[in-house]
Amino acid sequence: MSAPLVKVLHRLQELFQNMVSALETMILFPSFFRGFSHRRRKPFLGAHWRRRSLDDFADEVDTLFSAPLSTPKMIDMSNKIRAQIRDCLQNSPCCMLPSYTHALPSGSEKGTYLALDVGGSTFRVALIELSGRDQEMRIVRVSSSYIDNKVKLLEGTQFFDWMAGHIDTMLKDVGADYGRGKEPLSMGLSWSFPIDQTSVSSGLVIHMGKGFHCSNGTVGQELGQLLIDSCEKRNLNVEMAAIVNDSSATLLSRAYVDPKTRMSLILGTGTNMAIHFPVHEIGQSKFGVRPEDWFEYAKNVVINTEMSMFGGGVLPMTRWDDILNRTHLRPDYQPLEYMITGRYLGEIVRLIIVEAVETAGLFNGELPHSMREPYSFDTSIVAFLEEDSSISLASSAALLQKEHTFPSSPSVEDLRFLRRICQVTSRRAAAYLATGIHSMWCLRNEVEFPSSTTDLLSKESPEVTVIESDSSAKNVSIACDGTVINKYPGFRDTCQRYLDQLSAQSHPSSVSAIRLVPAHESAILGVAVAVAVAVAEKETR
Ligand code: GLC
């Protein structure tokens, strides 16, 4: 064989060996290869790899999110959600849950109470002083603990042990013997999850959303007792005087100040509404076993609606909502929640980002490593981007680079795309929330004012129910709390505008009939009111 031929054969053999070891690497380290191909995609494929422009993609997202938001379509959805609510009022074990709280506060309740609040991302222990309606409710002392993912993953009684630890620390700060006396110290609990209430001060655990694992192994157990058992391990002598859902706490805190309050709304990590509702409209089976005489004095009752669970099959979902739902710990459990709350807005935006990187060249076609994990794009960034109206969007760029790992700075075009996506996502959230609130308000009108309400089916659009009435009694203020409704830039105003359009369309004589009124610190204040009402009621019976 000639020398040049040997050289060529040698080269071929070398090439073959390289190919074999590349194949081996692909098989042994597929993730490395995926990352490698991802990083190199643009240089490999040149300019043609982009299938569409960012603008085209943003237009598509906008169309998909905005299409359901015309007033007639929203009224139609509201009617369908109202039908779902009516069904659940009769039988559902998970939503439209009547509490034992029938009397709203008189406003004369006084005293200092220990209030606990388990929210979606914080646990608070507070001492609250009530001095009557004319004086401001005072937070004497409060301690807040962040509920991080590790805590959310605590199962069953471990979570209550964690809570008891924080109660213990707070009580020691108040005084060495506080909570360790002969007489048990009364406390109230605001629980931002569903509960099957069995008395003013007790309730059975129901599955928890928001990524909490504490209900694993405790579903059906008595919530107050679980906490008291954990407190006993620390020699704390406490008793549970009232347990309320956080939405009910918000209603009570506002009703203490404004006796006309009948509805409340939470929109933070999760969403919910509470409503003071006629007992006779609720299915018998929903009350469980109650003393016979309860029904004699309870004409209305505060209902925890668990509104997050409505809207399935009614509120249109995009392909990103669909991915979120399918990959969720509890698919379909809280359809409304998955499209509107602080826990999910960031994730919806992240899923859109992932697709935009893959198909429209966002971030130069490279997804920052830090955005690969589900729920790694926080809703606070979505809010920040939306608030940034500067041309350069420089502060948004700085925040993104601080929170995420960009190999090179995102371009202004990228940032404008992101901002538009955030606007579209939050606008739909405000509209879907308004639709849910509207359905609850219409239901209240139907049951509270049956004679003044006439349902007319519009001839042109049989889907649209027009409800005529002139009664100003239908005007309601809705006490609202939660970071999204009260802090997300422009969210409450957008929701209010949708509510105005919906009420004007469905009740032409009621202009601005539904008003969203912020109720700050309502969970701890409201639970103190709940304890005060329970104590007052015990004394009168
Ligand atoms: C979730 C819970 C609900 C709570 C709401 C607001 O949707 O299921 O109980 O009230 O979040 O925190």
Image (cartoon, rainbow, N blue to C red):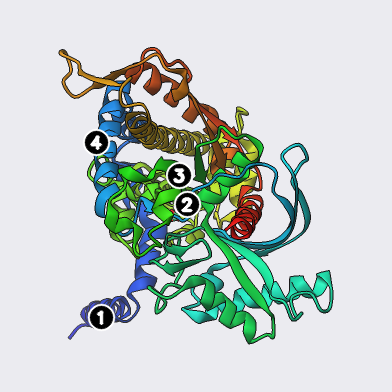
Within 8 Å of ligand 1, the CB of disc 2?
yes
Residue 110: x percent and y percent?
74, 51
Mark 4 vs mark 1, CA separation in Å: 61 Å
Res 326 quadrant in image: bottom left
Confirm whether residue 354 shows in the render: no
The residue identified by callout 4 is 80
Within 8 Å of ligand 1, the CB of disc 3?
no
Q: Label 2 neighbourhood size at 10 Å, few (<14), some (14-19), many (20+)?
A: many
**SS class, disc 2:** loop
Q: Which mark is residue 20?
A: 1
Q: Amino acid at mark 1?
A: Val
Which of pointers 4 and 1 lies earlier in the amino acid sequence? Answer: 1
Q: Locate the N terminus by quadrant.
A: bottom left
* Proximity of marks 2 and 3: CB atoms separated by less than 8 Å: no
Question: Which residue is pictured at 45% across the width and 49% down the height?
Answer: 297
Within 8 Å of ligand 1, the CB of disc 1?
no
Q: Which mark is residue 273?
A: 3
Is 29 displayed left or right of 230 in the figure?
A: left
* Proximity of marks 2 and 4: CB atoms separated by less than 8 Å: no
Mark 1 vs mark 3, CA separation in Å: 62 Å
Q: Amino acid at mark 2?
A: Gly
Is 444 displayed left or right of 485 in the figure?
A: left
The residue identified by callout 2 is 270
Discs 2/4, front: 4
Discs 2/3, front: 3
Q: Which mark is residue 137?
A: none
